[in-house]
Amino acid sequence: MLYDILIIGAGPAGISAGIYAVSRGKKTLILEQSQVGGIIGKVSTVTHYTALVPHETGATFAARMKEQALCAGVEIAYEKVTAVDLAGDIKTISTDKGVHQARRVILANGGTPRKLGIPGEDALDGKGMGMNAAKDAAAYTGKSIYVVGGADGAVKEALYLASFAKQLTIIHFEDQLGCIAEFRQKVAATGNITLRLASRLHGVYGREQVERLEIASERDGSIETIEDPGCGVFVYAGVLPNTDLYTGLALQDGYILTNDKMEASLPGVYAAGDIRLKQVRQVSTAVADGTIAAINAALS
Ligand SMILES: Cc1cc2nc3c(=O)[nH]c(=O)nc-3n(C[C@H](O)[C@H](O)[C@H](O)COP(=O)(O)OP(=O)(O)OC[C@H]3O[C@@H](n4cnc5c(N)ncnc54)[C@H](O)[C@@H]3O)c2cc1C
């Protein structure tokens, strides 16, 4: 099957692109390795995008995105893209389930949360370490919770988790939280949140659960050991762009370079959302990128 437009990724950028592509009469396929929604589909609370419903969760937001796309006639296949040939007029996309071809391709496959690379991170994954706030918060009701990261996403998840935790500690490597004023004020007004600034999580230890943490000081390099059996550690240490497959494209710091039509460096190839080099990475900008990419892909 030869598609007019093939989109990789069903996050906000890919879904927006899909809706606009079919509205232009284009035969469109979205390839998604996991679920519709992308990163925002997995968060506890979605904030600041327009027309959110009160207490919007990632899951409810993603469900509406999916429904809108399917109602619009977007075809979504749950396949992981494993190789791409983007050079010719007809683009070939290989997945874990087959091969697809299209005249235009929109790369909207976002990023992957960065790991810390510390002792215990992999061994305790899912056993108290690297948890998902939306899914796992309730299991830590009345317990200690540690959140690694001080940017908007991290602090937003911390505010949600604090409503379950006995005590919540935010571990952040800088001297101040790197989040917006709204979240900073909410943290100050939340009685059970403690800040460990200029600090890094250095290691987690235990067998079936996290028993002990080590926190390193950025100021003097000292390491403090904290015994805290059964605590939960939630990591929001940034996101790395999923561009490993795109070796033929111009990248900067791992992000895809585009012009203002969202065209990448090869003809017929577009990029949208968090995967491209840009200043602001939010749902609103991902949706806007997807719109622009699809309209231009349909015109070209
Ligand atoms: C903790 C956190 C909280 C946030 N909260 C907010 C918020 O409240 N409001 C807001 O506006 N923004 C928020 N953001 C930012 C927002 O989530 C992103 O800007 C947005 O999700 C980017 O959308 P995207 O479609 O570009 O990429 P993504 O959301 O990353 O989606 C990419 C999709 O591509 C798929 N994919 C990846 N590789 C492949 C492959 N090889 N084959 C097939 N599919 C693939 C992925 O499974 C994923 O579904 C938050 C970010 C974080 C980290």
Image (cartoon, grey):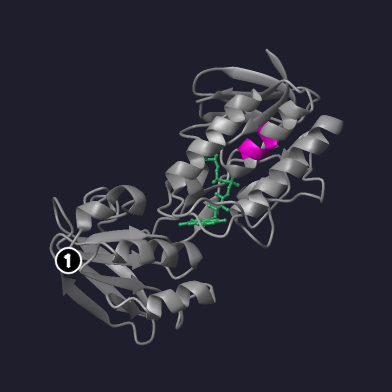
Residue 17 within the magenta-colored segment of the rendering: yes
35 lies left or right of 270: left
The three-letter code of the residue at mark 1 reads Arg
Boundaries of the magenta span: 14-18
Q: In the image shown, does 13 or 271 lie closer to the viewer?
A: 13
Residue occupying the far top of the picture? 1
> Where residue 215 sits: x, y (%)?
28, 74
Residue occupying the far right of the picture? 300
Q: Which residue is at a point 61% across and 57% down the rendered structure image? A: 281
Image height of 16 relative to 50, above or below: above
Q: Which residue is at a point 20% across and 59% down the rendered structure image? A: 141
296 lies left or right of 177: right
> In terms of image quadrants, where is residue 156?
bottom left
SS assignment for the magenta stretch, majority = helix
> Where residue 101 sits: x, y (%)?
69, 20
Residue 206 within the magenta-colored segment of the rendering: no
> Where residue 121 sits: x, y (%)?
29, 55
Q: Which residue is mark 1?
A: 212
Q: In the image shown, does 183 or 257 lie closer to the viewer?
A: 183
271 lies left or right of 9: right
Q: In the image shown, does 256 or 3 lie closer to the viewer?
A: 3
Under circle 1, the secondary element is: strand
Neighbour tally class for label 1: few under 14, some 14-19, many 20 plus, Cα within 10 Å: some
Residue occupying the far bottom of the picture? 220
Please state, as top left, top right, bottom left or bottom right, where the N terminus lies in the image. top right
Residue occupying the far front of the picture? 54
> Where residue 31 sits: x, y (%)?
57, 28
Is residue 243 in view from this perspective? Answer: no
Please state, as top left, top right, bottom left or bottom right, where the C terminus lies in the image. top right
Is residue 205 in view from this perspective? Answer: yes
52 lies left or right of 44: right
